[in-house]
Amino acid sequence: MVKELLAYLRPHRKILVVGGLLGLIGSAAGLAMPLLAKYVVDAFGRNASMAGPLLGLTIAVVIGAAVSAGGSYLMERTGEGIVLGARRRLVDRMLRLRVADVDRLKPGDLLSRVTGDTTLLRSVLTNGVVDSIGSAFMLVGAIVLMAAMDGVLLLVTLLVVVLIGGLVALIMPRIQRAQAQAQEAVGEMGAVLDRALQAYRTVKASGAEEREIAEVAGAAARARDRGLQVAGWTSLAGVATWMTVQIAFLAVLAVGGARVASGALEVSSLIAFLLYLFYLVAPIGQLVNGGVELQQGLAALKRIKEIEDLPAEPAGVVPHEESTPIGVEFRDVVFRYGDDRPIVHNGVTFEVPAGGLTALVGPSGAGKSTVFALLERFYDHQDGRILVGGRDIRDWPLGELRAALGYVEQDAPVLAGTLRENLLFAAQDATEDELRSVIARTRLDDLVARLPDGLETPVGHRGVLLSGGERQRVAIARALLRKPRLLLLDEATSQLDAVNELRLREVIAEVAAETTVLVIAHRLSTVTGADRIVVMEGGTVRAVGRHDELVGEDELYRELAATQFLAS
């Protein structure tokens, strides 16, 4: 994990070297101050002029402050660059993860990793590593000068530092464990809050505000408790640092006073030694803080690496040159969402010819939406074969496969932004004429005319300013702009009224004349004119045919049609 931390520093090593040198120069100026103070005391004892030593002391203070400030700015600037790079890498990986991995993760926890964990990473890479190097230099320099003054007093000081330093070393692993638990608790709190915000209207309509507030408050309390554990161990490390200097001061004062009384040590040397001893407070404190931040950073890096180590899908979408429709064939496909989950597809076999309209129907839980998830390769089937355009689906480059498909999800998600941005989301290079044509085909022209700024009107978070039917038509228009060779429509008419459903059926019929359309429908009125209807039940295909054939031949389909007044 330390190697991983250093990997984040590597791109910034030049500016870190400059900042580190400035810090060392500032530290060297600081190290000169106790020695100059000794000269001032000696000059005072000889009744000599103190102008020179005082001037040197003043110059050392000013130079040390200015150089240290410059080095500190460079470190902070580098820290922000490190955070930017870490966040870019993490977001890049998150948006390329497989759907199966994202489904088991919590959005609020993912956000916590991008925000809180990367911020901790900045602290450890600047304060924890770079400042610790400067502090180590200051510590070594002070020890060398203290050794030049009196070796006996140095041995007394080091004995105290080593004893209490061992205690601090024992505390550090506990800080890392407590910090990891604290970050997990913060992520859990974000996940609980995200759940409530994603279902905000449901929470309001259910009168569940108090219950959800209590849930979030409970998660926040757990995060506080974990944070208190970190604070407790950190405070103990800080107290140990403070005790180191205080005990060392008392020991040096006692031994040094005896040596001064015996004539073995000058008073000015004892004063300078004590000044150096107090000068050790800052570097020792920074080293301890650096160790604490290193443990916190390791905990944060572990959470970041958990995401970065997940397998990612290949980058990029390959634009498709061909526009000819493609067919689909499932051959004895077996699939489950996990080894501990029930089988969803158990030998599913059917064929979708290239061109025309094919419908998937059946009761909930039959495995219809899973067909689309497998075609988009959000998941991979465990057995059997899936052919797309005559090629095994695993032989398609993922970007090329998805570029050939247009997919309209059941809940027809609309993103925050303008209507234009949503329509062009999957086809950034579409022309204005193509955009206007699709708007007319999906009967969105009335919506565009009604909105105050037309296509440039913001649609709100998750398209809240649009009706359910409008969101569905926007999603269909977005898919059509891709000019797909295979269009997948999952419950495309579920939120439309009778008039708009009729219009959309006309649109689907027009599109089916140009490409392959595969639609999932609970409302059979949408697909009574389909070229082929596949009836699914319990993860298998029980019948295939046209509407009239299935009404007469398949009991389940006849029952579904009868409940919707499409058959007696």
Image (tube, grey):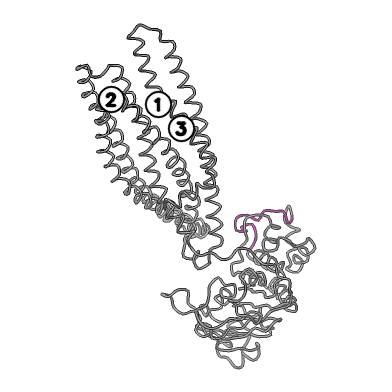
Residue positioned 34% across, 51% down in the render: 177
Query: Closer to the camera: disc 3 or disc 2?
Result: 2
In the depicted structure, whether residue 120 falls above or below residue 152: below
- State the residue in front, 304 or 405: 304
Secondary structure category for the residue under label 2: loop
How many numbered badges does the structure rendering display?
3
Quadrant of residue 474 in the image? bottom right
Mark-to-mark CA distance, 1 and 2: 17 Å
| Mark 1 and mark 3 residues within 8 Å of each other at the beta carbon | no
Residue positioned 67% across, 84% down in the render: 353
Q: Which badge, 1 or 3, is on the more N-terminal residue?
A: 3
Secondary structure category for the residue under label 1: helix
User: What type is the residue that disc 1 sits on?
Assistant: Leu
Q: Which residue is mark 2?
A: 150
Residue farthest to the top? 47
In the depicted structure, whether residue 458 falls above or below residue 73: below
Q: x, y (%) of residue 386?
A: 58, 81
Q: x, y (%) of residue 422?
A: 67, 60
Mark-to-mark CA distance, 3 and 2: 25 Å
User: What type is the residue that disc 2 sits on?
Assistant: Asp
User: What type is the residue that disc 3 sits on?
Assistant: Leu
Q: Which residue is mark 1?
A: 31
Q: Which residues are magenta?
A: 454-467
Residue positioned 31% across, 35% down in the render: 241
Q: Which badge, 3 or 2, is on the more N-terminal residue?
A: 3
Neighbourhood count class around disc 3 (C-alpha, 10 Å): few under 14, some 14–19, many 20 upward: many
Q: Which residue is mark 3?
A: 24
Q: Is residue 92 left or right of residue 459?
A: left
Q: x, y (%) of residue 438?
A: 75, 67
- State the residue in front, 410 or 147: 147
Query: Closer to the camera: disc 1 or disc 2?
Result: 2
